[in-house]
Image: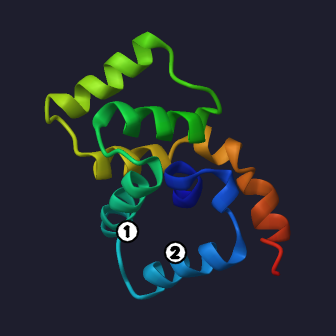
């Protein structure tokens, strides 16, 4: 679920999935893995500011760009230092929205196809 929230459905591929799962297999916590994911997200987006971060995770998890109200609310949390980008990514990863976006039931029933 982290892969979709951070990088989008295009990255839900076996090779990428195995790298992320390997980090968890090594005993890393979700928060530790999100700490690693955020700088990669910045590189892919070409920008690490809070506005871009919110737009990115919202698009990945909800499937549309945030409206002005959602953008302001979520970005405000980050801008005020109430939460880090890594913590927000961790929380968003575990939402029902993210679960339904990636069809977690289908993945758990059939697994990821391997290339």
- Taking the image as shown, residue 75 lies to the left or right of residue 62, namely left
| Relative image position of residue 95 (x, y in whole percent) | 52, 42
Residue found 65% across the figure and 33% down from its top = 63
Under circle 1, the secondary element is helix
How far apart are the two marked residues, 2 and 1, measured between alpha carbons?
8 Å
> On the image, numbered disc 1 is attached to which residue?
33
**Front-most of 46 and 32?**
46
Residue found 31% across the figure and 69% down from its top = 32
Q: Do the residues labelled 2 and 1 touch (CB within 8 Å)?
A: yes
Q: Which image quarter is the C terminus in?
A: bottom right
> On the image, numbered disc 2 is attached to which residue?
20
**Front-most of 98 and 56?**
56
Query: Is residue 96 visible to the viewer in this orientation of the structure?
Result: no
Note whether 25 is above or below 17 in the view shown: below
Residue 102's tag is: none
Note whether 74 is above or below 57 in the view shown: above
Query: Is residue 84 visible to the viewer in this orientation of the structure?
Result: yes
Q: Which image quarter is the N terminus in?
A: bottom right
**Front-most of 34 and 115?**
115
Residue found 30% across the figure and 63% down from its top = 35
Residue at the outermost bottom position: 26
Note whether 91 is above or below 17 in the view shown: above
Q: How crowded is mark 2: few (under 14 residues within 10 Å), some or many (20 or more)?
A: some
């Amino acid at each position: 679920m982290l892969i979709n929230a951070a990088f989008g459905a295009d990255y839900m591929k076996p090779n990428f999935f195995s790298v992320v799962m390997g980090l968890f297999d090594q005993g890393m916590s979700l928060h530790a893995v999100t700490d690693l994911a955020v700088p990669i997200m910045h590189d892919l987006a070409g920008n690490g500011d809070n506005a871009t971060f919110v737009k990115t995770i919202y698009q990945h998890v909800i499937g549309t760009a945030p409206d002005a109200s959602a953008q302001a609310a979520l970005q405000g949390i980050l801008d005020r230092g109430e939460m880090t980008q890594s913590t927000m990514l961790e929380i968003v990863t575990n939402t029902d929205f993210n679960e339904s976006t990636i069809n977690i039931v289908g993945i758990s029933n059939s697994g990821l196809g391997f290339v």
